[in-house]
Amino acid sequence: MHKPVQLHAVFTFHDDLIAALRALREKNIDLQAVHSPVRNDEITALTTNNKSPVRYITLCGAVLGILSGFGLSIYTASQWKFIVSGKPPVPIVPYVIEGFEFCILFGVLFNIIGMLLLSRLPRRSLPAHYDARVSQDRFSVLVNCEPDACDSVRKILHDAGAEEIHGIT
């Protein structure tokens, strides 16, 4: 089994990059990374296929928060045995407030942690394929391709208007 080859192409114009992304998407070629000097909704639409799993991490944190809020309240009431006016020692309804507060707290914390982990922040070094020109006025795309399909991918990138194309090792 052959190891996939990574090709890195640099584009001068936004329209050329969009044309390359459309052509690569039509051929089902694996996109690894796209770099742009500015945020662009059209690039985002062409490169993202699924929604972020951060929402599930946040949901897990919120559910854990609800359980923790109720658990802490019930544990505290059980330990101190405050019985007021003949009410049950563990009244569930007033504990909804603690459950809600812990839900928000844990949900936010899990959201931040999930976002940082999944976006691989903090990044201590730049990837080998990163070209500093994409921070100024260029666009770039990194694709994976099989060794026998490399020439056709190079042709797609070149026909789209790539300024330069080189392999990454």
Image: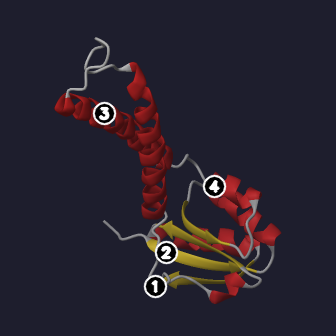
Give the residue at x 60% y 53%.
Answer: 48
The quarter of the picture where residue 12 lies is: bottom right
Give the residue at x 31% y 13%.
Answer: 87
Seen as rendered, the residue at the extreme front is 85
Q: Which residue is mark 1?
A: 125
Q: Residues within 10 Å of mark 4 (few under 14, many from 20)?
A: some
Name the side, left or right, on which 121 lies relative to 51: left
Q: Earlier in the sequence, mark 1 or mark 3?
A: 3
Seen as rendered, the residue at the extreme top is 86
Q: Earlier in the sequence, mark 1 or mark 2?
A: 2
Q: Residues within 10 Å of mark 1 (few under 14, many from 20)?
A: few
Q: Residues within 10 Å of mark 2 (few under 14, many from 20)?
A: many
Q: Which residue is mark 2?
A: 6
The C terminus appears in which quarter of the rendering? bottom left
Measured Cα–Cα span from mark 3 to mark 4: 53 Å
* Relative depth, front residue between 128 and 86: 86
Indicate which disc residue 25 carries.
Answer: 4
Measured Cα–Cα span from mark 1 to mark 2: 19 Å
Image position, residue 80 (x, y; %):
20, 32
Q: Which residue is mark 3?
A: 73
The N terminus appears in which quarter of the rendering? bottom left
